[in-house]
Image (cartoon, rainbow, N blue to C red):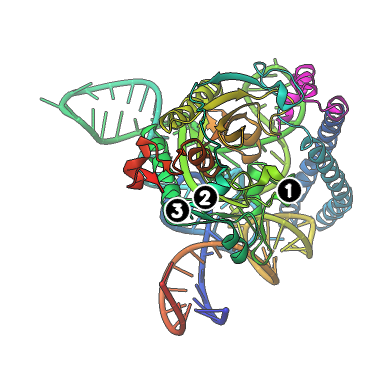
RNA sequence: GGAAGGAUGGGUGAGAGGCUGAAACCAACAGUUUGCUAAACUGUCAUAGGGGAAACCCUAUCGCGGGUUCGAAUCCCGCUUCUUCCGCCA
């Protein structure tokens, strides 16, 4: 959620940036927000004046009784009783206004940073880096879903039997490969200064609101009715919520956390070939990195996080590219996002394996995560996170790109110490 | 799952309808002074919102949400959570 202060003070700029996302009603929404906020202040001022008056009169009652001035005390009681109705009326009016303002406020996405190129579709994203690791095959490469079956390392049908589509079972070297990748990613994050966290994978409503999954993405999360919990769609949610309603000492910034968790997504409405195999799952594993920074440092940190993710892909010897998302393709809460995509040798397309974003104060505002500055004033922090990395598509790209003419799959050098084997098949 | 007792500022902890946004102590920070790595003394020390150029003023908040009352940290109801005991259990 954007800060109301920022919307008020930089109305033209914020409107312009949000329009760039393609939200055509930006102007109307912002005008309405400001109107409601004016109204809010007006009612609040009136309400508070009345409360002050009421408090003052109520305080005199005790003294009057002590002095034996019974009639005056009774008169004071009557006066406050009468004012209570008016106070209640104003309180209700205020609540209505605040609810209206809130429901408008949550419609506003984050304002894209000035460095984000304007655009409408994924085609407008700019490729800011691409390595030269694309391999060409002198045989017809198999897609990962066939390779996985051939080597019996992932069992799709077993997953359907146990749970349903989108919940594959990893077996033998497939399971070990996954575990090796998780371990590798966590170790690398540790080396880069991230403290490892093992959070709960169920979250309550407040946490869902804190990072912005609720209310807008309600239907995308699995929900445990009996206990009112949600399964996490990403470790970002529990890890970032550690800092909900926390005031951090400036000297403790930046905070760098990482964590491995399974992630759960309902992916309601996704069907067809692009969800084939590991491309889109209901349950998958991911190592996430999160940073909480000073506002003036966040863009520097965004690049640092990208460099970390690219380092992982480099070490895995995967063909990949880095995209700067355009205004129209960015997530709702982000001010600037880079996506990392790996080349799928057999599917002949790019697969997104990481998304690294700076949310500026958009999450911090909801989280009420602040730091204390030199003047001992509290200010909202900037939050950032990125996948480092999401497992399934990395596995898909690894086995597709590393398949050999004899059908075997080579394990990248850096992983061999983790897997204990250098090839599958 | 059953029973009992708790939840107050960074920490310990008083307060038991009005004088309490909250004693006292500890920690922290700033200053004064004496001076061998420290002591003594003084002061500051919650968050959010509103008003004001500012000094400052007002409002709300004592786990959370309701209620009683002219007035609630204090009384009542519901919830959350912690501790202890019993039961169950990886």
| Chain bearing mark 3 | A
> In 3D space, how far apart are the residues under numbered discs 2 and 3 (Cα atoms)?
11 Å
**In the rendered structure, are the residues bearing label 2 and label 3 in contact, judged by CB atoms less than 8 Å apart?**
no
Q: Please tell me whether residue A92 belongs to the stretch shown in magenta.
A: no
Percent from the top left, x then y, of residue A390?
53, 41
Q: Which residues are magenta?
A: A1-29
**Residue underneath mark 3:** A175
Percent from the top left, x then y, of residue A376?
52, 27
Question: Going from the N terminus, do you reach mark 2 or mark 3 first?
Answer: 2
Q: Across the whole image, how many numbered discs are drawn on residues?
A: 3
- Quarter of the rendering containing residue A328: top right
Percent from the top left, x then y, of residue A303?
51, 22
Camera sees residue A156: yes
Both marks 1 and 2 on one chain = yes
- Chief secondary structure of the magenta portion: helix
**Residue underneath mark 2:** A148
Q: Please tell me whether residue A12 belongs to the stretch shown in magenta.
A: yes
**Of residues A44 and A55, the one drawn nearer to the viewer in this rendering:** A44
Both marks 2 and 3 on one chain = yes
Of the residues tagged 2 and 3, which is closer to the observer?
A: 2
> In 3D space, how far apart are the residues under numbered discs 1 and 2 (Cα atoms)?
21 Å
Q: Residue at x 82, y 28 (%)?
A: A23
**Residue underneath mark 1:** A271
> In 3D space, how far apart are the residues under numbered discs 3 and 1 (Cα atoms)?
26 Å
């Amino acid at each position: 959620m954007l800060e109301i202060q920022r919307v008020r003070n930089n109305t033209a700029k914020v409107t312009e940036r949000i329009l760039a996302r393609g939200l055509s009603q930006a102007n109307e929404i912002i005008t309405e927000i400001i109107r409601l906020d004016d109204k809010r202040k007006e009612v609040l001022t009136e309400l508070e004046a009345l409360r002050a008056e009421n408090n003052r009169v109520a305080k005199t009652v005790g003294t009057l009784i002590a002095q034996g001035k019974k009639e005056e005390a009774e008169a004071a009681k009557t006066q406050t009783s009468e004012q209570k109705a008016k106070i209640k009326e104003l309180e209700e009016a205020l609540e209505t206004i605040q609810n209206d303002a809130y429901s408008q406020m949550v419609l506003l996405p984050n304002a894209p940073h000035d460095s984000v190129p304007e655009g409408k579709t994924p085609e407008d994203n700019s490729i800011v880096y691409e390595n030269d690791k694309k391999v060409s095959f002198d045989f017809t490469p198999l897609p990962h879903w066939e390779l996985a079956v051939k080597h019996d390392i992932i069992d799709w049908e077993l997953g359907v039997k146990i749970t349903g589509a989108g919940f594959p079972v990893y077996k033998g070297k497939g399971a070990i490969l996954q575990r090796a990748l998780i371990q590798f990613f966590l170790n690398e994050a540790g080396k880069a200064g991230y403290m490892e966290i093992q959070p709960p994978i169920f979250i309550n409503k407040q946490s869902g609101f804190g990072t912005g999954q609720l209310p807008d993405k309600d239907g995308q999360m699995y929900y445990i009715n009996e206990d009112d919990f949600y399964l996490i769609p990403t470790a970002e949610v529990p890890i970032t919520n550690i800092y909900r309603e926390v005031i951090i000492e400036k000297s403790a910034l930046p905070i760098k956390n990482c964590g491995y968790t399974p992630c759960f997504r309902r992916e309601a409405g996704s069907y067809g070939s692009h969800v084939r195999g590991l491309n889109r799952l209901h349950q998958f594993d991911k190592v996430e990195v999160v940073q909480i920074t000073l506002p003036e440092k966040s863009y520097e940190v965004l690049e640092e996080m990208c460099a970390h993710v690219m380092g992982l892909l480099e070490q895995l010897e995967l063909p990949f590219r880095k995209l700067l998302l355009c205004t129209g393709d960015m997530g709702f809460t982000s001010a600037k996002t880079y996506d990392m995509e790996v080349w799928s040798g057999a599917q002949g397309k790019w697969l997104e394996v990481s998304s690294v974003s700076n949310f500026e104060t958009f999450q911090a505002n909801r989280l009420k995560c602040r730091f204390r500055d030199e003047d001992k004033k509290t200010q909202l922090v900037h939050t950032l996170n990125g996948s480092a990395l999401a497992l399934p598509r990395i596995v898909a790209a690894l086995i597709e790109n590393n398949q050999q003419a004899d059908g075997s799959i080579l394990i990248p050098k850096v992983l061999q110490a983790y897997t204990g084997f250098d090839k599958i098949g």
